[in-house]
Image (cartoon, rainbow, N blue to C red):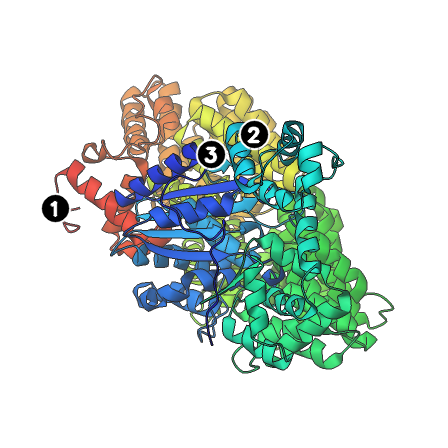
Amino acid sequence: MFTLSQQTERSRPEHGPVLGRRRECDLLDGLLDAVRGGASRVLVLRGEPGVGKSRLLEYVTTRAQGFRVARVAGVQSEMELPYAGLYQLCAAMTDRLDRLPGVQRDAVSGALGMGSDRAPDGFLVALGVLGLLSEAARDRPLLCVVDDAQWLDRASMQALAFTARRLQTESVAVVFAARTSDEEPPGVPEPVGLPELLIKGLPEPEADALLRSVLPGPWDERVLRRVLAESRGNPLALLELSRRSTPAALTGGFGLPSTRPVGERIRNTYVNRIAGLPADTREFLLAAAVDPTGEPALLWRAARELRIDPEVATDAVAAGLVQVGDRVRFFHPMVRSAVYWSASPEERRGMHRTLAEVTDPAADPDRRAWHAAHGATGPDESIAAELERSAGRAHTRGGSAAAAALLARAVELTPDPVRRRDRALAAARATHEAGEPDRALKLLSLAETDLVDERRRGEVDLVRARIAFTTDRGAEAPGLLLTAAERLADHDVELARDTYLEVVNAAIFAGPQAYDDGQYEAARAARGLPAPRPPRPTDLLLDGLAVRIIDGHAAAVPELRRALGAFREPDLSPTEGLRWLWLICVTAVGLWDHDTMSVLAGRHLRLAREAGQATALPFALTMRCVVHVLDGELAEGAALAQEVQTFAEAVGTAAPIYGALFVAAWRGREAECLDLSRRADEGVEHRGEGVGPVVSRWARALLYNGLGRYPEAAEAADLASREYVQLEMGIPVWSLVEYIEANARAGTAAQAADALDRLTELTRASGTDWARGIEARSRALLTEDAGAEVHYLEAIEALGRTSIRGESARAHLVYGEWLRDRGRHDEAARELGLAQSRFEAMDMRGFAQRAVGGSVHRPVEGTGGTASTEGDLTPKEVHIVRLVREGLTNSEIGTRLFVSPRTVEWHLRKIFGKLGVTSRRQL
């Protein structure tokens, strides 16, 4: 193999500023200086094709002396191959993989096709890439340049965008170049939410100088002015349009003005240049354009297969269109596009077939299948089957989008109608997983064309229902899931029963309006579908929930307790745990079983962290946050709520805010609570989550009870539970508790009698200390005579045996208020003082203020009432100190906070200085 190269305007390295780009170059130099100083910096260069983004990337690369440099360039035709871009960027860093935590190492190894059998979650891959870049920069700064970012495969872009958002103090610079044009594919996750620099055309003096430097004189000044105006200062347009300007046009002004966009004219210029080349040169260029790897050895094998004389490559290089060295590079991505699309469809298909023939089936089976698919002239089962196998490998590597694209192409090439429908269904599932619901629905329409198989129809319905639940968690999803379950019942009992359980889960999110349209019908149908023997944990849960929905809470308690016990067994599979532990925790709340809720919420969070599953982690964090809040550990709960928000910012998605709402309500922070409450109410409009307003009203009721504004508390609590035909477990029931207390303190106790009856039906059957204490406290509030005291004391005793410290302190509070109202001041002072001290220790300032009947010192927002030694620490530093005290390593802390271990090291150095300590042990 030999190397051919030719210096061009695009490829020539220069150390001075790029013509007309002094400001941009100064900014890039400043970026490099900051990274040399230990910071990390990210920048997105955005502009139209040909405006000079790649030239600026070359500039920053030449200026990065002392840096390790990693490059990746997106190729449109490679968007279907999972982690193809990431492989380009990280292949030279794989010697650092052993420094990553095990699950991240396996995830990145799997994504790069390095032998891991684990199917990586994209979130874990992204965390691993963050750690890998950090480790690569440990010896010297690292510069990553990403050209044509709009053409990176989805999986790579998601990982790199996450990494870019989380870089802080790793000495890493990431510079993206992305187009702004109508050609970009819809839905491609570009690097959004990052600092951007819009690259515009050259200023007129510099554009004029560039144009005159490449045009032989003489010139007609009017013509030059017109060319400058039409090019809008686009450097590539100036260079390429000058190539085809005739002397007559330049000197006499006889050329016709063009009304076509600059990008289109540049492409046409390249097309015309390519058309003027000899046929074998065009064929060589087409081979280079068809192969996205830029691998010279593969290009030479294709040339031999096509019997192209090696001298032809010299002509292609001499034309200034391509460079063949250690990699095959086109002068500009638009050249590759022009070469590819100016060829006839048959020429393109033929070249893909050639590349398939010369690609090693053992070393790169996926790319071989990809080429074969693009070279197919019609349906071909052998190619479709190979694409299906490639899709399976892509899914194993975590490339859902790639698996979806490969399966969709397999559908097109499948001749047999039955297999085509099966593959369309598989493609729809993968496309749904990849986050493209509209495309998934189109594939589902193919899957159900002429479909007579009832099982398959049920599976189609199930995918459609899951899409509905993902996109809009309103009342539609439970009904669609119910239809799917009914179709599946005669063909797959276990899948049908799991789907009925999904109905119940979806109905919880949909809110009170989903009872008649989902829960009741699912419960009735589940009763007629006996569980397999022995029953799975999910079967026990479904049967128990069905009894609760149809026969009431008391009848269901024994069966639901069996389900809780089954889910507490150590042999519960991680897959089942990740799928169902959220729902079983809600069930534990419904049974007032705080111990089981705490154990299973902890297991759910541990599984979600280990799996790095982006869909499960926010809900697992929120449930564990609720446990901390119930235990009076508001600082710990706030840290997990903040982790949910940090996670959402890192991955660029909306976050559930319910954990933060719990914390704000218990802390008595009115402005924060009302803002979060408003956002929860908006969940109905944005995501169809009918449960959002229920949670927000309960939170306002709790807030106002703490602040002593009882009429407002009563109104909010009434709205939270009024619409339910049958109260859901958890928040709607807790709203009864707030409603009873608000009415009792407002002097309208009679209005809460029905609420106490409804509450008692639920608490007596459960029989836990939590349930008995809440019932006794509520009954005491509505008892007018001296008989109330025995209930207050019962509540204090029962709740005192639990770890639910906030509710226990409230029992002392209301008892103290009752004593004070009856003139028993010494006893009242003791109970109220006890309640106040406990509320203040837990940072429940609203209730603490109520306990003394006046104002209470409030800490600065965000400090959470931390000890004085932590007073100078930021909230993030406080969180890190707590994680260090838990015994976590820097890598584990970085995983929790979605930052690199080196950023954790940087924070610890600052913490040590602030606290005057020198070791982790002293923390």
Residue, disc 2: 678
The residue tagged with tag 1: helix, strand or loop? loop
Q: Dividing the picture into quarters, in which one does residue 866 lie?
A: top left
Q: For mark 2, does the 10 Å Cα neighbourhood hold few (<14), some (14 to 19), or many (20 or more) residues? A: some
Question: At which x and y percent is residue 500?
Answer: 68, 61
Identity of the residue drawn at 70% across and 49% down: 268
Residue 768 visible in the displayed image: no
- Give the Cα separation between the discs numbered 3 and 1: 51 Å
Q: Residue flagged by tag 2: what amino acid is it?
A: Arg
Q: For mark 3, does the 10 Å Cα neighbourhood hold few (<14), some (14 to 19), or many (20 or more) residues? A: some
Which circle's residue, 3 or 1, is located before the other in the chain? Answer: 3
In the rendered view, does 66 fall on the left or right side of 666? left
The residue tagged with tag 3: helix, strand or loop? loop
Q: Which mark is residue 20?
A: 3
- Give the Cα separation between the discs numbered 2 and 1: 45 Å
Residue, disc 1: 918
Residue 164's place in the image compared with 413, above or below, is: above
Question: At which x and y percent is residue 572?
Answer: 48, 69
